[in-house]
Image (spheres, rainbow, N blue to C red):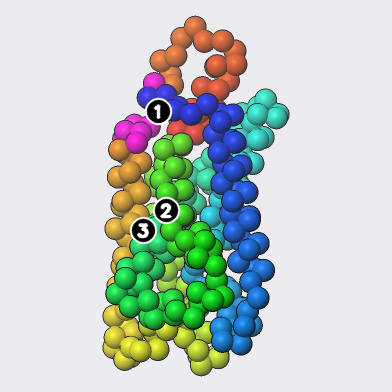
Amino acid sequence: MTARVDLKWCSLIHMAIFAWYIFTLKSNCSLEISARHPGARQYGGRWKYLTFINLVMQTVFFGFCFLTEAMYLLLSSKVPTLMVKMRDAVFTTLVFPVGTFVAMSFWSIYAYDRELVYPKFLDEIIPNWLNHALHTVILPLLLVQHYLQHHQYPSRARGILVLALFASLYLSWVLWVHYASGIWVYPIMAKLSPVGLMLFFAASALAMAPLYLLGEKLSHACWGTQGRRGVDSAIGKTRQEKDRLSYWKDQAGEG
């Protein structure tokens, strides 16, 4: 199975996505926070929101993808295997499952009762397009990334362990914010009993594992369990084509 998108087009797509996330991040940080929703002025600032952490994560990831391809195109040399492995590790264990969780959990709670996660008065502060940029657009862009590049998944035990560690650290951060400032990051947490809060945290953490497995299944559906097996079968290609195949070979972790 060979690459579906030419390397130059792939780099342009990554550049466009990176630019979109830079614009979204800048717009989010430029919001004039009113007294009704101090947000960034409260303890922990924007960093207490998983949505913002995810936004930064997506921005850095797609910027790294663009950098990796730009290095290859401009320097006409093989991309270091370490960079490809780093890209795959971050996407498979964090970027895809966390980004998908943000989109699915937000809209699930929103559909049940928006006041529990996104009170109506926020419509007057956060533009509708920015809300969708933060909670909706991330999902199709992650699917585009699955289509563009094959990612080598680690063992399930290792991948889920990394994701569980991230979830534990974030939940610990949420609890610390409440301990230090007396505020809950999301309105739904203030309405739960201690037992309900524990169940909510446990359910949120456990929901990450199926999303990791979903990413693995999507990767196999797009690329097959063996990745780009057709790379080694190319014969009689021009030098440029061989260089491109060499790059994609690295992408597939076969180099």
Residue 224 is one of the magenta-drawn residues? yes
Q: Which residues are magenta?
A: 222-230
Which tag is nearer the camera, tag 1 or tag 2?
2
Looking at the image, which residue sits at the far front? 124
Question: Taking 235 as reference, is 226 above or below it?
Answer: below
Marks 1,2: beta carbons within 8 A: no
Q: Nearer the viewer, residue 230 or 196?
A: 196
Q: Amino acid at mark 1?
A: Arg
Q: Amino acid at mark 3?
A: Ile
Q: Residue 21's x, y, as percent?
A: 58, 54
Q: Residue 65's x, y, as percent?
A: 57, 43
Residue holding disc 2: 139
**SS at mark 1?**
loop
- Kindly report the distance in space between the C-alpha atoms of the residues bearing marks 1 and 2: 24 Å
- Kindly report the distance in space between the C-alpha atoms of the residues bearing marks 1 and 3: 24 Å
Q: Amino acid at mark 2?
A: Leu
Q: Residue 124's x, y, as percent?
A: 54, 76
Residue holding disc 1: 228
Q: Residue at x 51, y 93 (%)?
A: 182
- Kindly report the distance in space between the C-alpha atoms of the residues bearing marks 2 and 3: 20 Å
**SS at mark 3?**
helix
